[in-house]
Structure formats: structure tokens, C-alpha cells
Image (cartoon, rainbow, N blue to C red):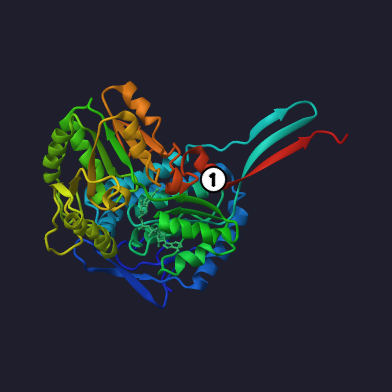
Amino acid sequence: MGSLAANDIDVFNGFYNTINGKSTTTEKTRHGTDPATEKQNPEVPIATKKDVDDAVVAAQEAFKTWSKTPWEERKRMVLAFADAFEKHAEDFSKLLTQEQGKPLQWAKTEVQAGLHWMRQITTLELKEEVLEEDASKQVVVRYTPLGVTLGIVPWNFPIHLACGKIAPSLLTGNPIIIKPSPFTPYCGLKLGELGQQIFPPGVFQVLSGDDNLGPWLTSHPGISKVSFTGSTFTGKKVMESASKTLKRVTLELGGKDPAVITKNVDIDATAQKIATLAFLNSGQICIAIKRIYVHEAIYEKFRDAMAKFTKTLTMSDGREDGVFMGPIQNSMQYERVKTFFSDIEKENWKVAVGGKNEERTGYFITPTIIDNPADDSRIVTEEPFGPIVPLLSWSDENEVISRANNTAMGLGASVWSNDLEEANRIARQLDAGSVWVNTHLELDPTAPFGGHKESGVGYEWGIGGLKSFCNVQTLFLKKTIS
Ligand code: NAD
């Protein structure tokens, strides 16, 4: 058992699970890897089945009072937590770069996004709705907390995505257990320790472990809802496991976002934006641009402009100044992304830029553009989740809409054109949860975010996101017995 002083968190030394208001360790431990140096990061706990049971019991106990704590008081505590987190923003950013690999400038952006999400979500209100009222009766729709919730977080945005689950769950009266990815447990665990300064025991807990932990939690009968962000493959397993006890699920899954570039664009400016939005976070973003459809009239010029700009993107250890791209987060993902590079020769793909990876320490992948591969090639149909994208030529509007929609995914999509009527017309026909015109990847904590088709079930954030942490109750109130 380890514990921390109540007024501080131990930023660099010691990582603990948070169970029932205490920082706890486990007999067996494991560690993540710094993806830029391949050096071991510090040891973290491997939660046991008993830890899971203890955390669920503590959360169930906490639910009794937290669910009845007034909304304003819960909101005050979530905001106090955001303030405490902000005081440690610098340390969290450095820790994020060390565990995730993203350059420090983007780590800082992620910390700010986490703060922004928590604060903005508290500006939302979930009021009772009076559907009908007359002298004899009232019909009211109420939103009541579900119980203990579970937030499962992937390794690409460990802080931002955790904050996007913590705030709505706690605000609506549901204690939450966060399970970070085993690849990036560090910042999540520190958030848990920090939370003990603010929240009553059992309200906000964090468990890190090995591959057993997720299934133990999703199958636990004491948990009422799973808010999952990760791959479509794992999302299906989570839904299957949750179905045994009919847990509520929100699934935020994979994407294969198309960007449709019409001929009515400024080629250089658009090419630079598209490359940035495809290679940011080394392509490891669910809503990164993953298929780029360029009108044939400008295809070659656009390809060359994008290739030229891509060559200027700096890639190195994220602790160095001004770096745009860091490494791939883990060796498993690195090996997977490299299989797309092996396909270049096998499948005879043309390369507009990149295509080869130099031997070096760290999981670095050179940003690469594949020049007009076949529509049924792997690079067009699968999500590499790394900095390699296909550029595809189109000529007819209906044809490009149908190609853009021809995927099992439906997370994001964008249209780029100076002709807003054209852009709007195309945008409204794209089958995705978020559709952008002349931008991509912009999100808002007060707007719903979710995927169509196999990109997800339900959605997070906004008022609807709050409702997804609630039961709905219709109260029929007859004013007299007659
Ligand atoms: P992943 O599915 O491998 O893991 C996600 C989380 O699920 C991790 O915490 C992992 O430990 C846990 N997990 C794994 N197996 C589990 C099981 N059987 N039961 C319960 N939990 C289990 O995903 P990843 O590789 O960490 O993340 C990359 C994927 O996530 C990409 O496909 C990306 O598009 C997607 N993603 C989606 C969104 C979104 O909001 N839609 C956001 C970020 C990432």
C-alpha cells in the first residue's frame, strides 16, 4: 500500500491505482515504454480481481450520496478538480509526452483540451421537462443517474478522452472508474490521485492493469454503464460482454474519414491543411483524415503541393523544440503500420512522398502519401492508425460521394471548396457523425460526437452525452384520486 499527501501529487515517482479514496499498489507491477527512446517508463500496478470488486463496492457506496448531492455541488467539485489539474498542467504535459510520444506542444494542447472539456461540460444543464400540465395532472420527464460507470480509454489521447468521460459522469451523479490503456496508464493514474483531493472516496477511481482488467470490469454486475473509446474490434467485445448484464454502452470507435477536395480550392493552402490533419499525432487520431479524394482537374498539382509540404514536417523525440510529429505510441502499433509499407512493393503502389523508414531508435514512421491506389486496396479500406494515407482522384460528384461512403466506418468526413453551395450539398450526403466544410477534426464539448455504422453506438458530449449517463423516467402525476 502506498499513499500520497493529501495536498499534493507525486508527479514523477510512484504510480498508484485509486480505490476508495486511497492510492494503492499491487504485488505484481508492469511498465509502459517511452516510444521515442524505447526505454522503460516507471512501474505501474496490475489491478487484481479483488481490486475490481473493491472499487465497484466503493463506487456503489459512493453512489448513495453522490447521486443525491445537488447538481450545483457536483458541478463545483468538477470545476475544483479542473482547477487542481490546471495547476499541474506543465507536469502532466511532460508526462504525456514521455508515455504517449506526442510532441510537447501537442501534449500541452491535449491538457488544455481536457480542461476545456471538463469546464464546458459543466455549463450544460439537464433540466426536467414538463410535457403536460393542467389542473388535474402533470407529466414530467426526469433524468436520473444510472449507477457506477466505467470509462475505458485508448492510448492516443489518454487525458482528453478521460476528461470527456469523467465530467459528464460525475456531473450527472454517477461515480466513475477510469481504465486507461496499459500502453498509456501514467496520466490517468495521476488524475485519479489528484481527484482524491476533491471528491469523496469511491466517486472517482482509476484502475490500471493488464489485459484481464477490461473484461473483468465490462462483465462486472455492479457496473451500470460502459463509456468506451477504442477500436471497432474491441468495441464489439465490450458490447458483447456488457450485454450479459444489459449495461448501457456508448462506443466511440474507429474511423476511416474521407476528405473530398473539389476543384474550387486554393491548392497550396488546402494541401497544407490536409497534410497537417492527416499526419497530426502521427496519424493516430480516430478523426484524422484517412482517405483524400482530390478532383482530377487539380489532382497532380495538389499531390505535388502536399508532398512538398509533407517533406517539411519535422519528426523527432517530442521533447525537442518545435517538433511536429513524434513516434507511433507502441511497438505493436508500429509493427502494424509497417505492414502497409511492406505492401508498397507487393501491391505496386506509387509513392508521392515518404515510403521508407530509416533504422533508428524509437517507433518513428515517415509520413507517406500513396498516389492513387485502387479503391479496394488495403490502404483505402483499412485504418492504419499511422502516418500513411492514400490520395485518390475523382471526377463526378455522385461518384465521389458514393466512394466516400463506401466503408463500414462513419466517424468523420469533410468537404473542401470555396463554393459553399457545392460544399454544403456534398457534406449533407456524407454518412458520418461529424461532417466539416473547409476544416476537419474540430470538436466542441457542447456538441454531440459519435460515429455512424461501425464507428460507434450512441454519442458523447453535449446535452445528449449527459443524457447517455442517465435513466429516463416519465413521472405521471395525477393531482387528485378520482
Ligand atoms: P483498443 O480497442 O485496442 O483499446 C482501447 C481500450 O480498450 C484500452 O484501454 C484497452 O486496454 C481496452 N481493452 C482492450 N481489450 C478489451 C476488452 N476485451 N474489454 C474491455 N476493454 C478492453 O484501441 P487503441 O488501440 O487503444 O486505440 C486506437 C483505436 O481507437 C483506433 O481504432 C481509433 O480510431 C479508436 N479511437 C476512437 C475514438 C473515438 O472517439 N471514436 C477516439 C480515439 C481512438
Image quarter for ligand 1: bottom left
Nearest the camera: 328 or 341? 341
Residue for point 15% across, 48% down: 351
- The percent position of residue 438, horizontal first and vertical second, equals 29, 30
From the image, which quarter does the C terminus lie in?
top right
Would you identify the image quadrant in which residue 220 lies?
bottom right
Judge left or right: residue 382 versus residue 169.
Answer: left
Residue 405 is at least partly visible in this image: yes
Residue 409, relative to residue 127: is it above or below? below
In the figure, 269 relative to 34: above or below? above
**In the picture, which quadrant includes the N terminus?**
bottom left
Residue 370 position in % (x across, y down): 19, 47
Is residue 71 toward the left or the right of residue 284 in the image? right
> Residue 154 vs residue 326: left or right?
right
The residue at which mark 1 appears reads as: 468
> Toward the viewer: 258 or 376?
376
Please tell me whether mark 1 sits on a helix, a strand or a loop: loop
Q: Residues within 10 Å of mark 1 (few under 14, many from 20)?
A: many
Q: Position of residue 194 (x, y in %)?
A: 41, 57
Residue 431's quadrant in the figure? top left
Q: Is residue 358 above or below residue 393?
A: below
Amino acid type indicated by mark 1: Ser
Depth order, front residue of 430/325: 430
Q: Is mark 1 within 8 Å of ligand 1?
A: no
- On screen, 398 above or below 153? above
Question: Which residue is depicted at the point 22% across and 27% down?
Answer: 263
Q: Quadrant of residue 95?
A: bottom left
